[in-house]
Image (cartoon, grey):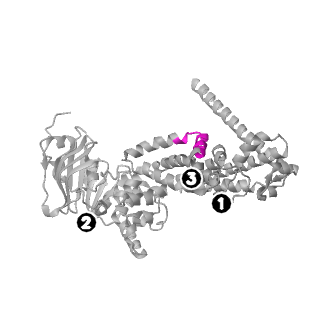
Amino acid sequence: MKDYDLTKKAIFTPDPENVIIDLKDVQVSYGPKHISKDVTMGFEKNKVTALIGASGSGKSTLLRSLNRLNDGIATVEGQILFHGQDINAKSANVYAVRQHIGMVFQKPNPFYKSVRKNILFGLQDQNLSRDQEDQILEESLRQAALWDEVKDSLTRSALALSGGQQQRLCIARALALKPEVILMDEPTSALDPLATAKIEETINTLKKEHTIIIVTHSMQQAGRIADNTAFFHKGLVLEYNHTSRLFTNPSLEITQDYLTGDFG
Amino acid sequence: MKQKYEELLGRSITGISITIICILVFSILYFVGAKGISMFVSGDGSIVDFLTGTQWDPGDGLVGALPMLVTSLMVTLTSALIASPLALILAIYVSEVSESKLAQFIQPLIEVLVGIPSVVYGLLGLEVFVPMVRNAFGGTGFSILTGVMVLTLMILPTVTSLMIDGLKAVPKHYRTASLALGATQLQTINRIVLKAARPALLTAIIFGMTRAFGEALAVQMVIGNVLVMPGSLLSQGSTLTSTLTMGIGNTILGTLPNNALWSLALVLLIMALFFNILIRLVGRGGDN
């Protein structure tokens, strides 16, 4: 592998008006292992931002820091500003943060409960009436493009659904809390191309009302769905720009080489 | 050809082993079964007297086993009732509060306790619990309560250890999914982990009860061995197993006192089978 100059970065600064999550010098480490280094970047509201880079480049670790899922696992330093408030501060209400910033994981992980109970899991403490619950149930499932397939089997176990349906159920489950931001950690890596296409379609409609930050290993996927793309290498974010710009005319040699498959 | 030979050898060895085990199990069932019903078949004692009578003196033809049955069930259920919640709390601590150094230290410790012979627990009961009960409630200190205390202590490590395994078998991604939806750790344990692990937790409790029901020695050392219907937890008593171990050496094969003890053994065997079937049924509940 060539020697690259890792001090050179090309990070674009979005219009502060449109920034919903702003990272300032974020460091993540597992004990002595420093995973994410000096990450400073802003995520735009109602846009899809893709995080790409080779395995072990720190994308997923950074993503999990955005809703405090690294609590008790890794140490996260620096500021993570959500609407200007530091959610990485000790005083931040972790549970509220997670309701505003939802997450969908690599492997579909529905609970071994009915479809209905899965969707409503995060709302148990809100004392909703049956009608309100039904409404949220239908709304979330429609947003995740799953309603037509499961509307007659809402009481059946979620584990009876196909892998692609399970993943859309997990998206719907996150949507039920009406989060502003949805984090997705390689949400289609366990799915076949058809199911992947459906999820990507869903992501495209979701960005009207939500901000989506997605980690993906597929550059084609980033190209298809992301408005902005950030390239990670060894824990550093090296280049961040509009997807069209980054893919056609990257500023750094290392990004160029990664995109053309010269390494990684 | 070598593969074929190896395949044949493997099949033969497993086949022979299975046959031997089957023969053994069925011999035991047949032997205990035949000896156990001989008292009823010969007409020396009636099955109704055996199950409902309260007088046990086979030398005089009295074969009422009800007091022992009641005492056995009493010590089993009470000790399970005390041990299960304690075991659950310990298991949750060890499996869910994983960052704690103490938790990593507790599990191996519990596993060591599982292996301690029951006579040691009996001695402990004799030296510690008997005086404790005597000081607290008067009397000799030998009582069903003392037996319960010893059994609780004895089954606690077993039940805890099985519960830890059950909780740890719940996939990690269930917990992460729940936390990501804004649930607290307590809510996650309560709504996700405990529900997913329920069959395993119940199995652990039943397994503990099996052990408590079958334990003879430790109980016999502290329970007083008086063959009367227990009036309360503080009365002395005698369980099925303790009556068996006390009496079997003092009877002559083929006589009524001996056959009556075999009937007790048959009851124990049936209870063991019952607990086993229960564990299987409960364990199967997890698939749904």
Q: Residue A183 appears in which quarter of the rendering?
A: bottom left
The residues tagged by marks 2 and 1 sit, at their Cα atoms, a distance apart of 71 Å
Secondary-structure class at tag 1: loop
Share a chain, discs 3 and 1?
Answer: yes
Q: Which residues are magenta?
A: B113-126
Residue A226 shows in the view: yes
* Residue B4 falls left or right of residue B50: left
Secondary-structure class at tag 3: helix
* Residue A5 falls left or right of residue A64: left
Residue A108 shows in the view: no
Residue A225, percent across and down? 26, 56
Image point (47%, 63%), residue name: A114
Residue B246, percent across and down? 73, 43
Q: Which chain does tag 1 point to?
A: B
Residue type pointed to by label 1: Ser
* Mark 1 residue crowding within 10 angstroms, few (<14) / some (14–19) / many (20+): few
Q: Is residue A37 above or below residue A88?
A: above
Residue type pointed to by label 3: Ile
* Mark 3 residue crowding within 10 angstroms, few (<14) / some (14–19) / many (20+): many
Residue B135 lies in the magenta stretch: no
Q: Which chain does tag 3 point to?
A: B
Q: Which residue is mark 1?
A: B232
* Res. B205 mark: 3
Secondary-structure class at tag 2: loop
Q: Which residue is mark 2?
A: A208
Residue type pointed to by label 2: Lys
